[in-house]
Amino acid sequence: MTLSRPGLAAPLVRDAHASGSNSFGDLPEWNLDDLYKGEDAPELTRDMDWLRDACASFAADYEGKLASLDAAGLLAAVQRYEQIDIIAGRVMSFAGLRYYQLTIDADRAKFLSDCQDRITAFTTPLVFYGLEFNRLDEGHLAGLLAADAGLARYKPVFDRMRAMKPYQLSDELERFLHDLSTVGAAAWNRLFDETIAGLTFDVNGETLNLEGTLNLLTEQDRATREAATRALIAVFSSNIKTFARIHNTLAKEKEIEDRWRGMPTPQTGRHLANHVEPEVVEALRNAVVAAYPRLSHRYYRLKAKWMGLERMQVWDRNAPLPLEDDRIVPWAEAEATVLDAYAAFDPALADLARPFFTKGWIDAGVKPGKAPGAFAHPTVTTVHPYVMLNYLGKPRDVMTLAHELGHGVHQVLAAGQGELLSSTPLTLAETASVFGEMLTFRKLLAEAKTPAQRKTLLAGKVEDMINTVVRQIAFYDFECKLHAARSEGELTPDDINALWMSVQAQSLGDAFDFVEGYETFWAYIPHFVHSPFYVYAYAFGDGLVNALYAVYEEGDPDFRSKYFALLRAGGSMHHKDLLAPFGLDASDPTFWDKGLSMIEAMIDELETLDA
């Protein structure tokens, strides 16, 4: 068992863009007082001092002694460790969230870095814990678990720890890697964040940040979309050496560590962290790639026809349909839409989401220097999650709100498991978010008054699902190729560009031409930097939710109670056990076809509406 690398979890940004003006009302901002009231808060000083002493005393009490503890003694050690995790997580959540509000602020960046450095130093004495725990004899540990139900409750944590046993290094090397972390991947992550946040783009005489420029890709006017794309190309191209250096360094660092640990593939660490079998991920990947012609290729040919185009360009991929209403959705309407959709499923779901709007748990506005995209950060189980958006009033922004609130509700419910058991593996972390989107979509679809409105909603949902499934699996393939190529030597920007284009045509299909410069668009995707191979979790979550939603529509009378139980479980159960009550099994090769068939059925209906 090891503390997660000190620092805020990376902002995991969805592949969706919004657009619009500032005519959507007052947007909420975070109130971080529930963590700390400021950098100089006495509670923060107190917690830092406590953390230093707690780590030192933990090491003094337990290093070299785990094998001699009885069940009650080991449980006490686990609970002390859990409290350390809470305090460290609270400090880093506060420092990280403040930083993501304004990543170009030097004082906030320094505060985050100083907190990382101090907590890394404090927690270095704890490195022994996971290593020594994994040296416990299997029979001895089984006996301890059988003797104490409180200890046995942590078995899922122990199982995940011991899955890493074949790959752990010596105590000395593990301490070295722990100490090195703040100037390794964490430092390159910050360089990426600060570079991205500092970019500006000139579009038709207006200077915009990344978020504002990406937002223009969903404008109705094609010339505006093209201008935004060309501005992105110009800036990415002028910075491409920096982004290539970041990717080369991180991929090489990962290759070195994986080699020393004996990891068989670059993806192994992610699969272990997700508690998912490689063959399950491979089945998902293969099912999606096989479905490209039936899904994205077919849909984009339809879209080209709707837009009156012989060929589409990349700036048409997320364009609204010609018949689509470009009305700006006020924030109050977005809030009501999502809460009503949640309440229609179960009033308790809306009750869990409502405090996010009323208590300063959402930061929604687009501001200079703010991190792009959207995420939900769970902070720690003794506080509550925070949601970040960049809301610009498009229908897709409403779906993003539904998505991130789903994460937030999931995190609130899972908090009851405690700090070590609440964290949901990425394979299940997208369940409530994608389900929340589906609830919102189905509500809007049911309220559609004309075939044109229904067509617009269906097309928007299909595009979101293609972005979530097809595009993310293409991203996964790109990462697999990138890490494989980097293991053979340094990659030039042109090398990385070529890998990117090798998955774009395959996944998007024959309806597209690719403007010169689009090959640089890998540069801004944060997942590749912050969380290698994270992206398949989106496709996993979408396929899983489509299958779950089918069970819901079939009228299972106990579905709601089972669903809430799944969310409350957090990381305390394997995906196979969580899905069993619904009659589902993700390890079944045909499981993914069920989810993909839902997308296919929507495209079928669009073809019917188009006839």
Image (spheres, helix red, strand yellow):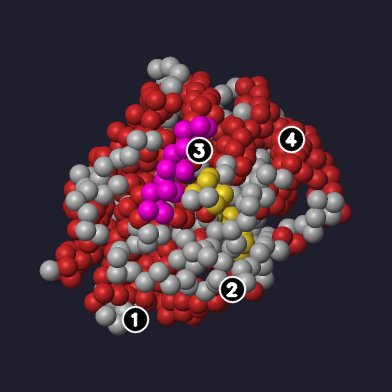
For image coordinates 53% across by 50% down, the residue present is 205
Q: Which residue is mark 4?
A: 117
Q: Amino acid at mark 1?
A: Glu
Q: Which residue is mark 3?
A: 235
Q: Amino acid at mark 4?
A: Asp
The answer to if 230 sits in the magenta stretch is: yes
Nearer to me, 467 or 82: 467
Nearer to me, 162 or 547: 547
Q: In the picture provided, is 150 more to the left or to the right than 460?
A: right
Q: Which residue is mark 2?
A: 25
Nearer to me, 236 or 277: 236
Task: Tell me how far mark 2 sits from mark 3, CA to CA.
Answer: 31 Å
Task: Tell me how far mark 2 sits from mark 4, CA to CA.
Answer: 40 Å
The answer to if 353 sits in the magenta stretch is: no
Quadrant, the C terminus = bottom left
Between disc 4 and disc 1, whose residue precedes? Answer: 4
Where in the figure is residue 390, as x and y percent of width and height? 55, 59
Q: Main secondary structure of the magenta part?
A: helix
User: Is 314 above or below relative to 243?
Assistant: below
Q: Which residues are magenta?
A: 223-239
Q: Which residue is mark 1?
A: 447
Circle 3 SS class: helix
For image coordinates 32% across by 58% down, the residue present is 463
Between disc 2 and disc 3, whose residue precedes? Answer: 2
| Label 4 crowd bin: few (<14), some (14–19), many (20+), radius 10 Å | some
User: Is 453 above or below relative to 581?
Assistant: below
- The residue sitting at the top extreme is 489
